[in-house]
Image (spheres, rainbow, N blue to C red):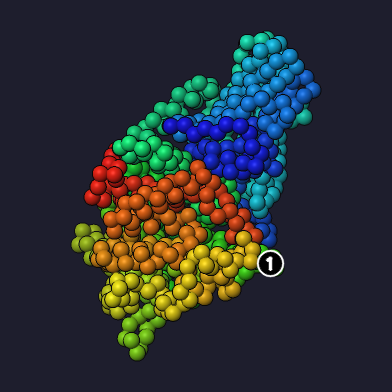
Amino acid sequence: MTLCSNGFDAEQTVANGNKFLIGNGKFGYRGTLDEMGREHCVGLNIAGLYDGVRGKWRETVNAFNPLYLKLFAGDVPLNAWSDRVVAHSQTLDISCGVFSRKTLFRIDGGTLQLRSERFCSMANTSVLASRLELVADVDVTVDIVAGIDVDVWELNGPHFASVTLRDEGDALFAEGITQEKGVSVKVSCAFSRQPVFEDGFARFRVCLKAGQTYTLDRIANILIGDEQPICNSTYDAEYRQNAESWRRLWDKSDVILAGSGVDEAQFALRYSIYQLLTLAPKRDCSIAARGLSGQTYKGAVFWDTEMFLLPFYLKTDPISAKRLVEYRIRTLDGALDKAKSYGYKGAFFAWESQDGYDACSDFNVTDVFTHRPVRTYFKDKQIHISADVALGILRYYDQTQDAPLMLNGGLTTLLQIAEFYYSYSYYDHVGGRFELLDVIGPDEYHERVNNNAYTNYMVYHCVKRTLELFGSFGESYPSATKEILSRFEPNICAALADWVGKLYLPKCNEQGVMEQFDGYFDLEDVTVSEVRKRLVHPREYWGGTTGVATPTRVIKQADVVMLAVTLPQYFTAEQIAANYEFYLPYTEHGSSLSASAYALAACRVGRPDDAWKWFLQTARIDLDGGGKQWAGDVYIGGTHPAANGGAWMVATQGFGKMCKPDFLREVKTFF
Ligand code: BGC
């Protein structure tokens, strides 16, 4: 279960930072090398700790780097990009989350090998530990300069108002206070040998004999707020505990593809599961769209969490699943405020949630030609987010029957969501129905459309289920349910039942195809490749008012197909097939969320070859460094948790449930 790369290619530094990422749910550490700094995008990204610097986008905080290290043989600096490198390789063992690198340097009269490994402990989640080993084939004096690098890579920083650095005993300590909320971030690094401290660095002079191995261990603690450090641990003890925690995680979550010729797919699937395991939150927060790989997408939580990540945790890790659901319940006030700010009732959840606050800006894309911000309506109009949150809560309850959670916020959140859509909808007197107008569906390229099929069905389904739940809770917990209802208008359930019965649900046409939104079929009938030829600039934004896709049927990602795989009960098998075939040539897959939806649909409609292709695409995304790196002028690179979750869904809910022709690999799951 090991990912390997041989040779050093400076061009791959950022990609490898994502690919070789390690993490433990509390923080992630990018797959960079010991000697790298901010220019190489070294990142120790903290889950759920946000900071905003005046006038810039608020984002998660990257902490100081406690594993910074420089090596010298005499006066000669030895690093991965020097002409002294004879060989270099790096690996990531996904069975226990251990990254390692080995670099062989040419030195006077011989060679020196540097090997280092590190892991973010899954057992003691404040700990980042590293072991360094040096061995040479000649006697040599080596100088090691190790320290906490406080020069942090940031997209919208600097996030620390003040930084203090000190040494004590065998350790270095750095503390920063975040700009916005004054949260303390403490990073320490204890060495297994006593250093000489000088200029804020720990220095070691090593007189290495030929063939002898020199070892230096570093145990770092990353502490947020008033968290206390783990004391007296050794590298070997931390290593054992970490490996044991990972073993238990894999026992619960491994998925095995049986059959011949599946090794590549098996590794990609396990790599996806590895990413999901590194993201399971360890405190009261959720999972960012780019996980712990950095600050892209502002470290914010999107619908990705409910639709692509939650299914994995629901089956393998109910504690994390509960945290994800509780995050939405805890941030309900933000959703109530957002709805109110637009003149609606109920709960309109943040499109890009940072503790409930909507980080999505009014100008979320920058034009590549003019470099001016482009007005986008994701925040204002992507109203399906509240239904996605509702579906997450409903699925959580279906899986766990956790009545206390429902009585302590779950039911209230569901009803507030229903009330939001009730107040948002518009009554069409001619048609005698309620409609959801001026919205954006999952396909973000077509903004401000009417009656997006995904949105209308998700709202219908979630409101119906909410009302059913109120019925059953009313019987099982009459006084608690009555108390919840007393905070809403009298007869709210009856009013919602009447309203949702009149909500417009677009139907499939004679060919079995459901129109993505009113008027979609009238758009220019042109395929993705044709639209791509119309681009003037490779990074130009396809959607919005002036995008190349806007006047056409070309869509960013699965939309009706996403609906068909999420709520298949509203479609016949023939209709799912018809929608799959119809929308495929128009889908750009400009979002990493798209491939898994198509894979799931392909499984449902008996197209195993297609399913396998989409599955590999989604499962391999972070191995291949796939996915868009730019939206206009805005960098959006990093890891892709939703694609990782999608890969797991395809394996278990797609292949796992499909009637299996021989060439379809048997899927064996451990839950
Ligand atoms: C997609 C959204 C997704 C977001 C974060 C965007 O490119 O269109 O659906 O939620 O990325 O992954």
Q: Residue furthest right?
A: 75
Disc 1 residue lies near ligand 1 with CB under 8 A: no
Can you say which quadrant of the picture contains the C terminus?
A: top left
Is 425 on the left-hand or right-hand side of 193?
left
Q: Closest to the observer: 492 or 392?
A: 392
Q: Residue at horizontal 40%, vertical 50%?
A: 613
Height in image: 611 above or below 169? below
- Dividing the picture into quadrants, the one containing residue 495 is bottom left
Do we see residue 141 in this rendering?
yes
Q: Residue at x 37, y 84 (%)?
A: 427
* SS category of the residue bearing label 1: loop
Q: How many marks?
A: 1
Amino acid carrying mark 1 in the image: Phe
Q: Nearer the viewer, residue 3 or 392?
A: 3
Q: Quadrant of residue 533?
A: bottom right
Mark 1, Cα crowd under 10 Å, few <14 / some 14-19 / many 20+, is few
Q: Position of residue 264 (x, y in %)?
A: 42, 39
Quarter containing the N terminus: top left
Please indicate, yes or no, whether residue 483 appears anywhere in the rendered image: no
Percent from the top left, x then y, of residue 488? 35, 71
Q: Which x, y percent locates residue 138?
A: 69, 11
Residue at 66% over, 15% down: 136
> Which residue occupies 72% across, 26% down?
84
Measured from the top left, where is residue 300 in percent x and y? 53, 55
The residue singled out by tag 1 in the image is 369
Q: Is residue 496 left or right of residue 171?
A: left
373 or 409: nearer the viewer? 373
